[in-house]
Image: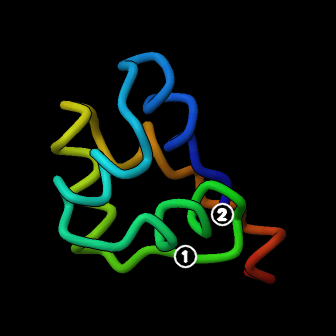
Amino acid sequence: MINKVQEYRKINKVTQNDLAISVDVTRQTIISLENGKYKPSLVLAHKIAQYFETSIEDLFIFDLEEENI
């Protein structure tokens, strides 16, 4: 899965810590998410999308080949 969390965060001038607090996770979770080492739950993906006032599909791009589907 490819995500644009870091891109949206930088465009909106939001720190990792501010985003983490807003969606009720740790800063380390945001770091891992941005580095592609963590796949968010649907609830977390929804919270982040709501925070940036966008859709989950705009933030998280599902790669069928990567997921072996």
- According to the picture, the residue beneath numbered tag 2 turns out to be 1
Q: Residue at x 54, y 76 (%)?
A: 39
Sequence-first disc among 2 and 1:
2
Q: Badge 2 local density, few (<14 within 10 Å), some, or many (20+)? A: some
Residue 3, given in percent of the width and then of the height, sits at: 59, 50
Q: Which is more toward the observer, 30 or 66?
A: 30
Q: Residue at x 22, y 74 (%)?
A: 43
- Helix, strand or loop under label 1: loop
Whole-angstrom CA distance, mark 2 to mark 1, is: 8 Å
Is residue 22 toward the left or the right of residue 29 in the image? left
- According to the picture, the residue beneath numbered tag 1 turns out to be 39
Quadrant of residue 45 in the image? bottom left
- Helix, strand or loop under label 2: loop
User: In this rendering, is residue 40 above or below 15?
Assistant: below
User: In this rendering, is residue 38 above or below 18?
Assistant: below
Q: Residue at x 28, y 69 (%)?
A: 44
Contact flag, marks 2 and 1 (Cβ < 8 Å): yes
Question: Mark 1 belongs to which amino acid?
Answer: Lys
Q: Which mark is residue 50?
A: none
Quadrant of the frame with the C terminus = bottom right
Residue 47, given in percent of the width and then of the height, sits at: 19, 58
- Nearer to us of marks 2 and 1 is 1
Is residue 5 toward the left or the right of residue 50 in the image? right
